Image (spheres, grey):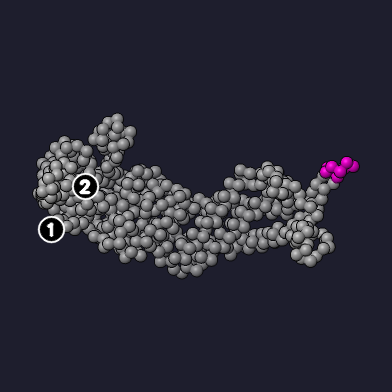
Amino acid sequence: MLDSTFSLLYPNGEDTPEQRVNISDEVIAELGLDFLIDLKNSNLADYFTTDKATIEYRIDTMNDMLENPTIVDTLKSTLKLLNDIIELRQIKSETEVGKNYLYSITEIELYIDIVSRLAKGFQSVKGNVKSSAFKRMTETVTELSESEYYRNLNKQLGELTAKVHDVKSITVGVNLDSEFRPVDAGVVSLNAEQFKSGKVIDKILRMDFKDDDYTCIAPLVPYTRSNTDNAKIAFTNAFNNAMNDIFKADVRQWRQLVQSYVLSNTDFLLRIMPEIEFLTKAQHLLLALKSRGMSLVKPEIADIDAREFNIKGIYNPCVALKVDSKMVKNDINFDENAKIYVLTGPNRGGKSVITCAVGQTQALAQLGLPVPADYAVISPVTAIYTHFPTGSEGDGAIEKGRLGEECDRLNKIFDTLDKYSLILLDESFSSTGSYEASYIASEVLTGFSMIGCRCLFSTHLHELSSQLDEINAKCSAEGGVPIDTLVAGIHGGGERSFEIIRAKPDGKSYARDIAEKFGLSYDRIMSRATRGLPLDR
Protein backbone atom coordinates (compact mmCIF):
# COMPACT_ATOMS: atom_id res chain seq x y z
CA MET A 1 0.00 0.00 0.00
CA LEU A 2 1.22 3.49 -0.83
CA ASP A 3 1.75 5.07 2.57
CA SER A 4 0.36 8.41 3.63
CA THR A 5 3.77 10.14 3.42
CA PHE A 6 4.28 9.42 -0.28
CA SER A 7 4.31 12.44 -2.59
CA LEU A 8 5.28 13.01 -6.19
CA LEU A 9 6.50 16.51 -5.28
CA TYR A 10 8.06 16.28 -1.80
CA PRO A 11 10.74 13.73 -0.84
CA ASN A 12 9.54 13.74 2.79
CA GLY A 13 5.85 13.71 1.98
CA GLU A 14 5.07 17.40 2.43
CA ASP A 15 6.58 20.84 2.63
CA THR A 16 7.17 22.85 5.78
CA PRO A 17 6.25 26.50 6.41
CA GLU A 18 9.86 27.64 6.29
CA GLN A 19 10.25 26.15 2.77
CA ARG A 20 7.34 28.09 1.27
CA VAL A 21 7.78 31.07 -1.02
CA ASN A 22 5.95 34.35 -0.60
CA ILE A 23 4.32 34.77 -4.02
CA SER A 24 0.81 36.08 -4.47
CA ASP A 25 -1.81 35.17 -7.06
CA GLU A 26 -1.39 38.68 -8.44
CA VAL A 27 2.33 38.14 -9.03
CA ILE A 28 1.60 34.76 -10.63
CA ALA A 29 -0.85 36.44 -13.01
CA GLU A 30 1.45 39.39 -13.79
CA LEU A 31 4.28 37.02 -14.69
CA GLY A 32 1.95 34.93 -16.86
CA LEU A 33 2.59 31.80 -14.80
CA ASP A 34 -1.13 30.96 -14.71
CA PHE A 35 -1.05 30.97 -18.53
CA LEU A 36 1.94 28.62 -18.54
CA ILE A 37 0.49 26.18 -15.97
CA ASP A 38 -3.29 26.48 -15.71
CA LEU A 39 -4.47 24.49 -12.68
CA LYS A 40 -8.11 23.67 -11.83
CA ASN A 41 -7.80 21.64 -8.62
CA SER A 42 -5.21 23.62 -6.68
CA ASN A 43 -3.34 26.91 -6.40
CA LEU A 44 0.01 27.21 -8.19
CA ALA A 45 1.36 29.33 -5.31
CA ASP A 46 1.22 26.25 -3.05
CA TYR A 47 3.93 24.43 -5.05
CA PHE A 48 6.80 26.92 -4.77
CA THR A 49 9.61 25.86 -2.49
CA THR A 50 12.99 27.10 -1.33
CA ASP A 51 14.22 23.60 -0.44
CA LYS A 52 17.06 22.47 -2.69
CA ALA A 53 16.39 18.75 -2.12
CA THR A 54 12.72 19.19 -3.02
CA ILE A 55 13.55 21.09 -6.22
CA GLU A 56 16.00 18.40 -7.32
CA TYR A 57 13.49 15.65 -6.41
CA ARG A 58 10.92 17.26 -8.71
CA ILE A 59 13.38 17.84 -11.53
CA ASP A 60 14.20 14.11 -11.52
CA THR A 61 10.47 13.29 -11.45
CA MET A 62 9.80 15.57 -14.43
CA ASN A 63 12.74 14.12 -16.37
CA ASP A 64 11.15 10.67 -16.07
CA MET A 65 7.89 12.08 -17.41
CA LEU A 66 9.61 13.72 -20.37
CA GLU A 67 11.55 10.57 -21.22
CA ASN A 68 8.62 8.16 -20.68
CA PRO A 69 5.35 9.43 -22.23
CA THR A 70 3.58 6.31 -20.95
CA ILE A 71 3.82 7.74 -17.43
CA VAL A 72 1.93 10.85 -18.50
CA ASP A 73 -0.75 8.85 -20.32
CA THR A 74 -1.17 6.65 -17.25
CA LEU A 75 -1.44 9.59 -14.87
CA LYS A 76 -3.92 11.42 -17.11
CA SER A 77 -6.23 8.39 -17.34
CA THR A 78 -5.96 7.99 -13.57
CA LEU A 79 -6.86 11.65 -13.12
CA LYS A 80 -10.12 11.14 -15.03
CA LEU A 81 -11.11 8.17 -12.86
CA LEU A 82 -10.29 10.08 -9.68
CA ASN A 83 -12.61 12.86 -10.85
CA ASP A 84 -15.31 10.21 -11.31
CA ILE A 85 -14.80 9.08 -7.71
CA ILE A 86 -15.13 12.66 -6.47
CA GLU A 87 -18.40 13.10 -8.39
CA LEU A 88 -19.69 9.76 -7.12
CA ARG A 89 -18.94 10.67 -3.51
CA GLN A 90 -20.71 13.97 -4.01
CA ILE A 91 -23.81 12.15 -5.25
CA LYS A 92 -23.64 9.75 -2.32
CA SER A 93 -23.47 12.59 0.19
CA GLU A 94 -26.14 14.80 -1.37
CA THR A 95 -28.90 12.47 -2.62
CA GLU A 96 -31.11 9.64 -1.48
CA VAL A 97 -29.92 7.65 -4.46
CA GLY A 98 -26.41 7.82 -3.09
CA LYS A 99 -27.40 5.70 -0.09
CA ASN A 100 -27.77 2.73 -2.41
CA TYR A 101 -25.27 -0.01 -1.68
CA LEU A 102 -24.66 -0.33 -5.39
CA TYR A 103 -22.88 3.03 -5.39
CA SER A 104 -20.24 1.50 -3.14
CA ILE A 105 -19.70 -1.19 -5.75
CA THR A 106 -19.18 1.50 -8.40
CA GLU A 107 -16.50 3.23 -6.30
CA ILE A 108 -14.68 -0.04 -5.75
CA GLU A 109 -14.90 -0.73 -9.49
CA LEU A 110 -13.26 2.64 -10.15
CA TYR A 111 -10.54 1.93 -7.60
CA ILE A 112 -9.71 -1.43 -9.17
CA ASP A 113 -9.64 0.19 -12.61
CA ILE A 114 -7.18 2.81 -11.28
CA VAL A 115 -4.87 0.18 -9.78
CA SER A 116 -5.02 -1.86 -12.98
CA ARG A 117 -4.08 1.14 -15.14
CA LEU A 118 -1.31 2.26 -12.80
CA ALA A 119 0.14 -1.25 -12.67
CA LYS A 120 0.04 -1.71 -16.45
CA GLY A 121 1.48 1.74 -17.12
CA PHE A 122 4.32 1.63 -14.60
CA GLN A 123 5.28 -1.98 -15.24
CA SER A 124 5.89 -1.04 -18.89
CA VAL A 125 8.50 1.56 -17.84
CA LYS A 126 9.83 -0.21 -14.76
CA GLY A 127 13.39 -0.45 -16.04
CA ASN A 128 13.49 3.11 -17.35
CA VAL A 129 12.44 5.26 -14.41
CA LYS A 130 15.24 6.95 -12.48
CA SER A 131 13.47 9.30 -10.07
CA SER A 132 12.84 8.31 -6.46
CA ALA A 133 9.16 9.20 -6.81
CA PHE A 134 8.37 6.95 -9.75
CA LYS A 135 10.64 4.12 -8.60
CA ARG A 136 8.73 4.02 -5.34
CA MET A 137 5.36 4.30 -7.06
CA THR A 138 6.24 1.56 -9.57
CA GLU A 139 7.33 -0.86 -6.85
CA THR A 140 4.29 -0.17 -4.70
CA VAL A 141 1.71 -0.39 -7.46
CA THR A 142 3.28 -3.62 -8.76
CA GLU A 143 3.23 -5.13 -5.28
CA LEU A 144 -0.37 -4.03 -4.75
CA SER A 145 -1.68 -5.36 -8.07
CA GLU A 146 0.05 -8.71 -7.63
CA SER A 147 -1.10 -9.29 -4.05
CA GLU A 148 -3.44 -12.16 -3.19
CA TYR A 149 -5.83 -9.72 -1.50
CA TYR A 150 -6.18 -7.61 -4.64
CA ARG A 151 -6.75 -10.66 -6.85
CA ASN A 152 -9.49 -11.95 -4.53
CA LEU A 153 -11.02 -8.50 -4.35
CA ASN A 154 -11.09 -8.30 -8.12
CA LYS A 155 -12.61 -11.77 -8.42
CA GLN A 156 -15.34 -11.14 -5.85
CA LEU A 157 -16.17 -7.78 -7.38
CA GLY A 158 -16.43 -9.43 -10.80
CA GLU A 159 -18.88 -12.00 -9.50
CA LEU A 160 -21.00 -9.42 -7.73
CA THR A 161 -21.05 -6.88 -10.56
CA ALA A 162 -21.87 -9.64 -13.07
CA LYS A 163 -24.89 -10.51 -10.94
CA VAL A 164 -25.93 -6.86 -10.82
CA HIS A 165 -25.23 -6.07 -14.45
CA ASP A 166 -27.12 -9.15 -15.66
CA VAL A 167 -30.35 -7.60 -14.45
CA LYS A 168 -32.12 -6.11 -17.50
CA SER A 169 -35.59 -5.75 -16.00
CA ILE A 170 -37.62 -6.53 -12.90
CA THR A 171 -41.09 -7.87 -12.38
CA VAL A 172 -43.15 -5.81 -9.98
CA GLY A 173 -46.05 -7.25 -8.02
CA VAL A 174 -48.85 -5.18 -6.52
CA ASN A 175 -51.41 -6.53 -4.00
CA LEU A 176 -54.91 -5.06 -4.11
CA ASP A 177 -57.62 -4.87 -1.48
CA SER A 178 -61.31 -5.72 -1.98
CA GLU A 179 -61.93 -2.30 -3.48
CA PHE A 180 -59.14 -2.71 -6.02
CA ARG A 181 -56.78 -0.32 -4.24
CA PRO A 182 -53.02 -1.11 -4.03
CA VAL A 183 -51.93 -2.07 -0.53
CA ASP A 184 -48.48 -3.60 -1.09
CA ALA A 185 -45.95 -3.46 -3.91
CA GLY A 186 -42.60 -5.10 -4.41
CA VAL A 187 -40.13 -6.75 -6.72
CA VAL A 188 -41.23 -10.25 -7.66
CA SER A 189 -38.26 -11.24 -9.80
CA LEU A 190 -35.07 -10.05 -11.46
CA ASN A 191 -34.91 -10.77 -15.18
CA ALA A 192 -32.04 -11.19 -17.62
CA GLU A 193 -34.19 -9.85 -20.49
CA GLN A 194 -35.81 -6.48 -21.06
CA PHE A 195 -39.60 -6.43 -21.22
CA LYS A 196 -41.47 -5.61 -24.41
CA SER A 197 -43.54 -2.46 -24.56
CA GLY A 198 -46.82 -4.24 -25.33
CA LYS A 199 -47.92 -1.49 -27.73
CA VAL A 200 -50.07 -2.68 -30.63
CA ILE A 201 -47.72 -1.23 -33.26
CA ASP A 202 -44.80 -3.17 -31.74
CA LYS A 203 -46.80 -6.38 -31.93
CA ILE A 204 -47.63 -5.71 -35.58
CA LEU A 205 -44.02 -4.97 -36.48
CA ARG A 206 -42.87 -8.15 -34.77
CA MET A 207 -45.78 -10.14 -36.20
CA ASP A 208 -46.08 -11.53 -32.70
CA PHE A 209 -49.53 -11.28 -31.14
CA LYS A 210 -49.15 -13.56 -28.14
CA ASP A 211 -48.58 -12.23 -24.62
CA ASP A 212 -45.79 -13.68 -22.42
CA ASP A 213 -43.99 -12.94 -19.17
CA TYR A 214 -41.94 -10.16 -20.79
CA THR A 215 -44.74 -8.25 -22.48
CA CYS A 216 -46.06 -5.16 -20.75
CA ILE A 217 -49.85 -4.85 -20.64
CA ALA A 218 -49.85 -1.19 -19.52
CA PRO A 219 -47.11 1.25 -18.43
CA LEU A 220 -46.81 2.48 -14.87
CA VAL A 221 -48.06 6.05 -14.64
CA PRO A 222 -44.88 7.80 -13.32
CA TYR A 223 -43.04 7.06 -16.57
CA THR A 224 -45.51 8.64 -18.97
CA ARG A 225 -44.63 12.01 -20.49
CA SER A 226 -47.46 13.79 -18.70
CA ASN A 227 -46.16 13.13 -15.21
CA THR A 228 -44.06 15.52 -13.14
CA ASP A 229 -40.40 15.10 -12.36
CA ASN A 230 -41.26 14.70 -8.67
CA ALA A 231 -43.41 11.69 -9.46
CA LYS A 232 -40.64 10.12 -11.51
CA ILE A 233 -38.05 10.83 -8.79
CA ALA A 234 -40.32 9.24 -6.16
CA PHE A 235 -40.72 6.17 -8.32
CA THR A 236 -36.95 6.00 -8.96
CA ASN A 237 -36.18 6.26 -5.25
CA ALA A 238 -38.68 3.48 -4.54
CA PHE A 239 -37.02 1.32 -7.16
CA ASN A 240 -33.51 2.01 -5.84
CA ASN A 241 -34.56 1.20 -2.30
CA ALA A 242 -36.00 -2.09 -3.48
CA MET A 243 -32.85 -2.98 -5.43
CA ASN A 244 -30.77 -1.96 -2.44
CA ASP A 245 -32.67 -4.43 -0.26
CA ILE A 246 -32.26 -7.21 -2.80
CA PHE A 247 -28.49 -6.88 -3.02
CA LYS A 248 -27.94 -5.76 0.56
CA ALA A 249 -27.13 -9.24 1.78
CA ASP A 250 -24.62 -9.75 -1.04
CA VAL A 251 -22.92 -6.40 -0.64
CA ARG A 252 -22.99 -5.68 3.08
CA GLN A 253 -20.66 -8.38 4.37
CA TRP A 254 -18.26 -8.06 1.44
CA ARG A 255 -18.28 -4.28 1.66
CA GLN A 256 -17.33 -4.29 5.33
CA LEU A 257 -14.33 -6.49 4.57
CA VAL A 258 -12.90 -4.26 1.85
CA GLN A 259 -14.15 -0.78 2.67
CA SER A 260 -11.30 0.34 4.92
CA TYR A 261 -8.72 -1.15 2.58
CA VAL A 262 -10.15 0.42 -0.57
CA LEU A 263 -11.01 3.78 0.96
CA SER A 264 -7.55 4.27 2.45
CA ASN A 265 -5.94 3.70 -0.94
CA THR A 266 -8.55 5.75 -2.77
CA ASP A 267 -8.15 8.64 -0.33
CA PHE A 268 -4.40 8.55 -0.85
CA LEU A 269 -4.83 8.77 -4.61
CA LEU A 270 -7.27 11.64 -4.19
CA ARG A 271 -4.71 13.38 -1.98
CA ILE A 272 -2.03 13.30 -4.69
CA MET A 273 -4.56 14.17 -7.42
CA PRO A 274 -3.54 17.89 -7.42
CA GLU A 275 0.11 16.81 -7.71
CA ILE A 276 -0.73 14.66 -10.73
CA GLU A 277 -2.52 17.60 -12.35
CA PHE A 278 0.44 19.93 -11.66
CA LEU A 279 2.96 17.49 -13.15
CA THR A 280 0.92 16.68 -16.25
CA LYS A 281 0.20 20.38 -16.94
CA ALA A 282 3.89 21.24 -16.42
CA GLN A 283 4.93 18.44 -18.77
CA HIS A 284 2.50 19.80 -21.38
CA LEU A 285 4.16 23.23 -21.10
CA LEU A 286 7.66 21.82 -21.53
CA LEU A 287 6.66 19.75 -24.57
CA ALA A 288 4.97 22.80 -26.12
CA LEU A 289 8.20 24.81 -25.77
CA LYS A 290 10.31 21.94 -27.14
CA SER A 291 7.97 21.57 -30.12
CA ARG A 292 8.80 25.18 -31.02
CA GLY A 293 12.51 24.45 -30.88
CA MET A 294 13.02 26.34 -27.61
CA SER A 295 15.77 25.26 -25.24
CA LEU A 296 15.13 24.06 -21.69
CA VAL A 297 17.82 23.35 -19.14
CA LYS A 298 17.97 21.70 -15.74
CA PRO A 299 19.04 24.51 -13.41
CA GLU A 300 21.93 24.04 -11.04
CA ILE A 301 20.48 24.97 -7.65
CA ALA A 302 22.96 27.03 -5.63
CA ASP A 303 22.71 27.60 -1.89
CA ILE A 304 20.24 30.24 -0.87
CA ASP A 305 23.00 32.27 0.81
CA ALA A 306 24.90 32.50 -2.48
CA ARG A 307 22.06 34.62 -3.93
CA GLU A 308 22.98 33.56 -7.46
CA PHE A 309 21.12 34.12 -10.69
CA ASN A 310 23.44 33.38 -13.59
CA ILE A 311 21.50 32.68 -16.78
CA LYS A 312 22.72 32.34 -20.34
CA GLY A 313 20.25 32.30 -23.21
CA ILE A 314 17.19 33.34 -21.19
CA TYR A 315 13.90 33.95 -23.03
CA ASN A 316 10.26 34.61 -22.11
CA PRO A 317 8.24 31.36 -22.47
CA CYS A 318 4.90 33.20 -22.71
CA VAL A 319 6.14 35.11 -25.74
CA ALA A 320 7.76 31.98 -27.20
CA LEU A 321 4.38 30.21 -27.17
CA LYS A 322 2.52 33.13 -28.76
CA VAL A 323 4.78 34.32 -31.60
CA ASP A 324 6.24 32.52 -34.58
CA SER A 325 9.24 34.80 -35.10
CA LYS A 326 12.69 33.85 -33.85
CA MET A 327 13.21 34.54 -30.16
CA VAL A 328 16.16 36.69 -29.09
CA LYS A 329 17.94 35.20 -26.08
CA ASN A 330 19.91 37.14 -23.49
CA ASP A 331 22.29 36.67 -20.57
CA ILE A 332 21.45 37.96 -17.09
CA ASN A 333 23.81 37.62 -14.15
CA PHE A 334 23.24 38.96 -10.64
CA ASP A 335 26.82 38.80 -9.40
CA GLU A 336 29.17 40.46 -6.91
CA ASN A 337 29.25 43.55 -9.11
CA ALA A 338 25.47 43.94 -9.24
CA LYS A 339 22.55 42.47 -7.34
CA ILE A 340 20.34 45.25 -8.72
CA TYR A 341 19.96 46.40 -12.31
CA VAL A 342 18.37 49.46 -13.86
CA LEU A 343 17.21 48.50 -17.36
CA THR A 344 16.62 51.29 -19.88
CA GLY A 345 15.97 51.35 -23.59
CA PRO A 346 13.48 52.23 -26.30
CA ASN A 347 9.77 51.70 -26.10
CA ARG A 348 8.81 48.16 -27.20
CA GLY A 349 12.48 47.24 -27.08
CA GLY A 350 11.99 44.15 -24.91
CA LYS A 351 12.36 45.63 -21.42
CA SER A 352 9.06 44.30 -20.08
CA VAL A 353 9.57 40.95 -21.80
CA ILE A 354 12.98 40.33 -20.19
CA THR A 355 11.77 41.60 -16.81
CA CYS A 356 9.01 39.00 -16.82
CA ALA A 357 11.44 36.36 -18.13
CA VAL A 358 13.65 36.80 -15.07
CA GLY A 359 10.67 36.24 -12.78
CA GLN A 360 9.39 33.31 -14.82
CA THR A 361 12.78 31.60 -14.79
CA GLN A 362 13.17 32.02 -11.04
CA ALA A 363 9.62 30.77 -10.49
CA LEU A 364 9.92 27.71 -12.73
CA ALA A 365 13.17 26.74 -11.01
CA GLN A 366 11.45 26.89 -7.63
CA LEU A 367 8.58 24.80 -8.95
CA GLY A 368 11.21 22.16 -9.69
CA LEU A 369 11.06 22.42 -13.48
CA PRO A 370 13.57 22.93 -16.29
CA VAL A 371 13.94 26.62 -17.10
CA PRO A 372 13.77 28.56 -20.40
CA ALA A 373 17.49 29.08 -21.00
CA ASP A 374 20.67 27.44 -22.26
CA TYR A 375 22.45 27.50 -18.88
CA ALA A 376 21.27 28.34 -15.39
CA VAL A 377 22.67 28.57 -11.88
CA ILE A 378 19.98 29.80 -9.50
CA SER A 379 19.69 30.29 -5.76
CA PRO A 380 16.17 29.99 -4.33
CA VAL A 381 14.46 33.17 -3.18
CA THR A 382 12.08 33.48 -0.24
CA ALA A 383 9.74 35.84 -2.08
CA ILE A 384 8.97 37.13 -5.57
CA TYR A 385 7.40 40.58 -5.88
CA THR A 386 6.26 42.56 -8.90
CA HIS A 387 5.56 46.28 -9.18
CA PHE A 388 3.98 46.60 -12.60
CA PRO A 389 1.73 49.35 -13.98
CA THR A 390 -1.94 49.20 -13.04
CA GLY A 391 -4.90 51.01 -14.52
CA SER A 392 -5.95 54.28 -12.96
CA GLU A 393 -9.52 53.06 -12.52
CA GLY A 394 -8.89 51.05 -9.33
CA ASP A 395 -10.25 52.11 -5.95
CA GLY A 396 -6.75 52.79 -4.61
CA ALA A 397 -5.88 55.01 -7.56
CA ILE A 398 -9.14 56.95 -7.24
CA GLU A 399 -8.55 57.63 -3.56
CA LYS A 400 -4.80 58.30 -3.61
CA GLY A 401 -4.03 59.11 -7.22
CA ARG A 402 -2.01 56.78 -9.41
CA LEU A 403 1.37 57.80 -8.02
CA GLY A 404 0.09 57.50 -4.46
CA GLU A 405 -1.27 54.05 -5.21
CA GLU A 406 2.07 52.97 -6.70
CA CYS A 407 3.95 54.24 -3.65
CA ASP A 408 1.52 52.53 -1.30
CA ARG A 409 1.96 49.17 -3.04
CA LEU A 410 5.72 49.49 -2.93
CA ASN A 411 5.65 50.51 0.73
CA LYS A 412 3.80 47.27 1.56
CA ILE A 413 6.42 45.27 -0.32
CA PHE A 414 9.17 46.91 1.76
CA ASP A 415 7.47 45.57 4.90
CA THR A 416 8.45 41.96 4.03
CA LEU A 417 11.33 42.42 1.57
CA ASP A 418 14.65 40.85 2.60
CA LYS A 419 18.01 40.02 1.05
CA TYR A 420 16.69 36.66 -0.17
CA SER A 421 13.86 38.28 -2.16
CA LEU A 422 13.52 39.03 -5.86
CA ILE A 423 11.63 42.17 -6.91
CA LEU A 424 10.77 43.20 -10.45
CA LEU A 425 9.67 46.72 -11.36
CA ASP A 426 8.36 47.75 -14.77
CA GLU A 427 7.84 51.44 -15.55
CA SER A 428 7.21 52.31 -11.91
CA PHE A 429 6.48 55.98 -11.17
CA SER A 430 5.74 56.73 -14.83
CA SER A 431 2.57 58.54 -13.73
CA THR A 432 4.54 61.58 -12.58
CA GLY A 433 7.11 63.92 -14.07
CA SER A 434 10.63 62.83 -14.84
CA TYR A 435 12.20 64.86 -12.01
CA GLU A 436 9.84 63.56 -9.32
CA ALA A 437 9.99 60.00 -10.66
CA SER A 438 13.79 59.96 -10.68
CA TYR A 439 13.90 61.27 -7.12
CA ILE A 440 11.51 58.58 -5.82
CA ALA A 441 13.26 55.87 -7.83
CA SER A 442 16.68 56.82 -6.43
CA GLU A 443 15.31 56.59 -2.89
CA VAL A 444 13.77 53.20 -3.64
CA LEU A 445 16.97 51.88 -5.22
CA THR A 446 18.92 53.00 -2.15
CA GLY A 447 16.53 51.00 0.00
CA PHE A 448 16.89 47.91 -2.19
CA SER A 449 20.67 48.20 -2.03
CA MET A 450 20.70 48.40 1.75
CA ILE A 451 18.37 45.39 2.03
CA GLY A 452 20.50 43.43 -0.45
CA CYS A 453 17.68 41.92 -2.50
CA ARG A 454 17.94 41.01 -6.18
CA CYS A 455 16.11 43.51 -8.36
CA LEU A 456 15.47 44.35 -12.00
CA PHE A 457 14.05 47.85 -12.50
CA SER A 458 12.84 48.44 -16.07
CA THR A 459 12.31 52.15 -16.74
CA HIS A 460 12.24 54.99 -19.24
CA LEU A 461 13.99 57.19 -16.68
CA HIS A 462 17.34 57.32 -18.51
CA GLU A 463 18.57 60.09 -16.25
CA LEU A 464 18.29 57.69 -13.30
CA SER A 465 21.38 55.89 -14.57
CA SER A 466 23.46 59.05 -14.14
CA GLN A 467 22.63 59.03 -10.43
CA LEU A 468 23.86 55.47 -9.82
CA ASP A 469 27.46 56.40 -9.06
CA GLU A 470 26.24 58.63 -6.26
CA ILE A 471 23.80 56.01 -5.00
CA ASN A 472 26.43 53.27 -5.12
CA ALA A 473 28.96 55.39 -3.25
CA LYS A 474 26.46 56.12 -0.51
CA CYS A 475 25.25 52.51 -0.21
CA SER A 476 28.69 50.95 -0.44
CA ALA A 477 29.85 52.96 2.57
CA GLU A 478 26.95 51.52 4.56
CA GLY A 479 27.21 47.90 3.36
CA GLY A 480 24.71 48.02 0.51
CA VAL A 481 24.92 45.83 -2.62
CA PRO A 482 26.04 47.38 -5.95
CA ILE A 483 23.66 48.59 -8.67
CA ASP A 484 24.49 48.38 -12.37
CA THR A 485 22.80 49.21 -15.67
CA LEU A 486 21.40 47.18 -18.54
CA VAL A 487 20.37 48.56 -21.91
CA ALA A 488 17.82 47.23 -24.38
CA GLY A 489 19.69 47.40 -27.66
CA ILE A 490 18.77 49.38 -30.75
CA HIS A 491 20.50 49.40 -34.10
CA GLY A 492 21.76 52.53 -35.80
CA GLY A 493 18.66 52.93 -37.93
CA GLY A 494 16.38 52.81 -34.91
CA GLU A 495 15.52 49.13 -35.36
CA ARG A 496 15.12 47.27 -32.06
CA SER A 497 17.43 44.31 -31.54
CA PHE A 498 15.74 43.04 -28.33
CA GLU A 499 19.23 42.32 -27.02
CA ILE A 500 19.93 43.24 -23.41
CA ILE A 501 23.46 44.56 -22.92
CA ARG A 502 25.29 45.27 -19.68
CA ALA A 503 26.38 48.82 -20.45
CA LYS A 504 25.89 52.49 -19.58
CA PRO A 505 22.87 53.97 -21.35
CA ASP A 506 23.07 56.97 -23.63
CA GLY A 507 19.82 58.87 -23.18
CA LYS A 508 20.36 60.77 -26.42
CA SER A 509 20.23 57.51 -28.35
CA TYR A 510 16.56 57.16 -27.48
CA ALA A 511 15.37 60.74 -27.91
CA ARG A 512 14.30 60.07 -31.48
CA ASP A 513 12.49 56.92 -30.46
CA ILE A 514 10.61 58.72 -27.67
CA ALA A 515 9.74 61.60 -30.01
CA GLU A 516 8.32 59.13 -32.54
CA LYS A 517 6.35 57.39 -29.82
CA PHE A 518 4.50 60.63 -29.06
CA GLY A 519 4.15 61.70 -32.68
CA LEU A 520 6.74 64.46 -32.51
CA SER A 521 9.30 63.29 -35.04
CA TYR A 522 10.58 65.86 -37.50
CA ASP A 523 9.04 64.09 -40.48
CA ARG A 524 5.62 63.90 -38.91
CA ILE A 525 5.70 67.52 -37.73
CA MET A 526 6.72 68.73 -41.19
CA SER A 527 4.08 66.59 -42.84
CA ARG A 528 1.39 68.24 -40.76
CA ALA A 529 2.88 71.70 -41.20
CA THR A 530 2.87 71.42 -44.97
CA ARG A 531 -0.79 70.41 -44.90
CA GLY A 532 -1.61 73.48 -42.88
CA LEU A 533 -2.80 71.38 -39.97
CA PRO A 534 -2.35 72.45 -36.34
CA LEU A 535 0.38 70.52 -34.56
CA ASP A 536 -1.90 69.40 -31.73
CA ARG A 537 -4.40 67.60 -33.96
Query: Which of the pair 414/426 is nearer the observer?
Result: 426
Whole-angstrom CA distance, mark 1 to mark 2, is 23 Å
Q: Secondary structure at mark 1?
A: loop
Q: Residues within 10 Å of mark 1 (few under 14, many from 20)?
A: few
Q: Can residue 361 be seen at all in this image of the molecule?
A: yes
Q: Secondary structure at mark 2?
A: strand
Query: Which of the pair 199/336 is nearer the observer?
Result: 199
x then y, percent, for residue 130: 42, 64
Q: What is the quadrant of the N terminus in the image?
A: bottom right
**What residue did someone put label 2 on?**
458
Tag of residue 302: none
x then y, percent, for residue 516: 16, 49
Q: Is residue 413 left or right of residue 535?
A: right
Tag of residue 493: 1
Vertical arrangement, residue 128 with respect to residue 245, above or below: below
Q: Residue at x 34, y 50 (%)?
A: 32
Boundaries of the magenta span:
176-183
Q: Residue at x 47, y 66 (%)?
A: 70
Q: Amino acid at mark 2?
A: Ser
x then y, percent, for residue 76: 49, 59
Q: Amino acid at mark 1?
A: Gly
Query: Which of the pair 128/507 is nearer the observer?
Result: 507
Vertical arrangement, residue 523 with respect to residue 69, above or below: above
Q: Is residue 300 magenta?
A: no
Q: What is the quadrant of the C terminus in the image?
A: top left
Q: Main secondary structure of the magenta part?
A: loop
x then y, percent, for residue 444: 20, 39
Q: Earlier in the sequence, mark 1 or mark 2?
A: 2
